Image: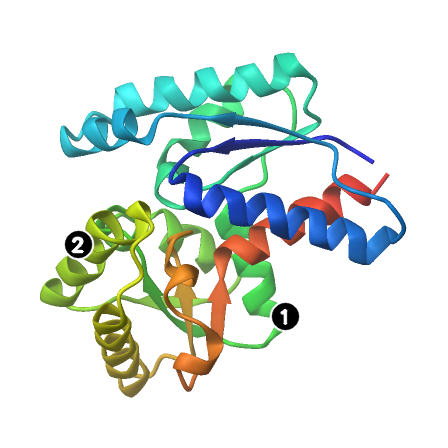
Amino acid sequence: MKTIGLIGGMSWESSTVYYELINKKIKEELGGFHSAKSIMVSVDFAEIENLQKKDDWDGLTKYMIKSAKQLENAGADLIILCTNTMHLCSDEIIKNVTIPFLHITDATGKKIQSKGLQKLALIGTKFTMEKDFYRTILKKYDIDVIIPDVDDREIIHRVIYKELVLGNIENNSRKVYKRIIKDLENKGAEGVILGCTEIPLLIKQDDVDIPIFNTTKIHAESAVEIALNN
């Protein structure tokens, strides 16, 4: 079994879900007393959020590279970044380590492609929805992306930062997210990418009529596949 390196803490609530999903998948695959070999570098999200507010992506990239190198030096065999937004730093992370980096969008694209879907809604932070890293990578899998309108993007982003990353799950916010997803479905979305690792804390498959793609679960289980593929 390979050792999975996780860059976590963004937020710690979703990082605990990653740890649980990875170990459950190992248990499912191997049975018995098996659990995952893993190492986590957990950052202080207050520092990350402050740099995001300042739009200091150079500083954020340096922070992510440092965390990735810590994992490599500690003996990790592969790296996963337990957040969607910070994948904006992924190209530089890859350049600065020698072990494999599993991109959350590649893992998600393969999963969507396996279901034969081609037009997907994307919800996440404003960074994830408005910057092009998801759109660019998913094109490799013949997948088109649509996002909410400006006002709804603001709502989604606010709920993530004011509620979900603080561990607050509000039913009213769930209702608003469900309405936004229904609007995207009416615009032709065949499924919805939960493109923030906190959103699955709020939205489940039973909440919507189209398939959801839980990027946290997809990413975690894809890491296990690599860890067991010796």
Q: Amino acid at mark 1?
A: Ser
Q: Is residue 24 above or below residue 37?
A: below
| Foreground residue among 204 and 98 | 204
Q: Which mark is residue 22?
A: none
Q: Say which quadrant the N terminus sits in.
A: top right
143 sits left or right of 171 in the view: right
Note whether 60 is above or below 70 in the view shown: below
Report the amino acid beneath label 2: Arg
How far, Cα to Cα, is label 1 from label 2? Answer: 32 Å
Q: Quadrant for the C terminus, please.
A: top right
- Outermost residue toward the right in this view: 32
Measured as percent of width and height from the top left, residue 86 is found at: 37, 37
Q: Residue drawn 15% across and 62% down?
A: 155
Location of residue 83 in the rendering, given as x and y in whole percent from the top left corner = 42, 43
Residue on which disc 1 sits:
114
Foreground label between 1 and 2: 2
Residues at circles 1 and 2 in contact by the CB criterion of under 8 Å: no
Which residue, given by chain and number where applicable, does mark 2 sit on? Answer: 158
Snapshot colouring: rainbow
